[in-house]
Image (cartoon, grey):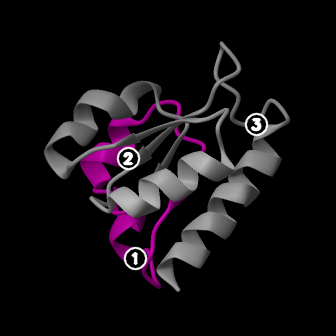
Amino acid sequence: MRRLTVLFSLLSLLCVGLSSYILAEDGQKKILLTYSDKALLEELQSVAPEARIIQLSGDRVLEEIADADALIGNITPEQVRAGKKLKWVQTMGAGVERLLHL
C-alpha cells in the first residue's frame, strides 16, 4: 500500500511539475527519497525517468535539500527551513502537525 501511495504521489508531482511549478532550471526535477528501500527507488525511477531521484539517509538530507524540488519521506522542521526550493513534501503518515511549528 505504501508503494502505491508513493507512486500516485510521484505521478501527481510529475503532472503538476510539467508547468513551471517545480521545474528545475535544467528541466530535471530533483526528488529526495528518505526511505532505504531499493525496490521502491527502482520503481519510482521506472515511472519517472526524467526526474533525478536521490535516495539518502536522514543525516545527508541537509546536504542535498537546498536545491531539491521535492522530498518523499520523513522531514524535520530544520530540513524544511533548509529546503529553499521545495515545492512538494510527501509524507507517508497521516497528520503533519510536527511540521506546522517551524
Residue hosting label 3: 21
| Mark 2 to mark 3 CA distance (whole Å) | 18 Å
SS of the residue under disc 3 = loop
Spot occupied by residue 9 in the image (x, y as percentages of width and height):
64, 64
Q: Residue at x 34, y 57 (%)?
A: 38
Residue most extreme to the right: 19
Which badge, 2 or 1, comes first in the chain's sequence?
2
Which badge, 1 or 3, comes first in the chain's sequence?
3
- Report if residue 79 lies within the magenta region: yes
Q: Quadrant of residue 10?
A: bottom right
Q: Residue at x 44, y 53 (%)?
A: 41
Residue hosting label 2: 80
Q: Look at label 3 and name its amino acid.
A: Tyr
Of 3 and 79, which appears nearest the observer?
3
Highlighted magenta segment, given as a residue range: 73-102
Say few, some or many: other residues with alpha carbon within 10 Å of mark 3 (under 14 / 14 to 19 / 20 or more): some
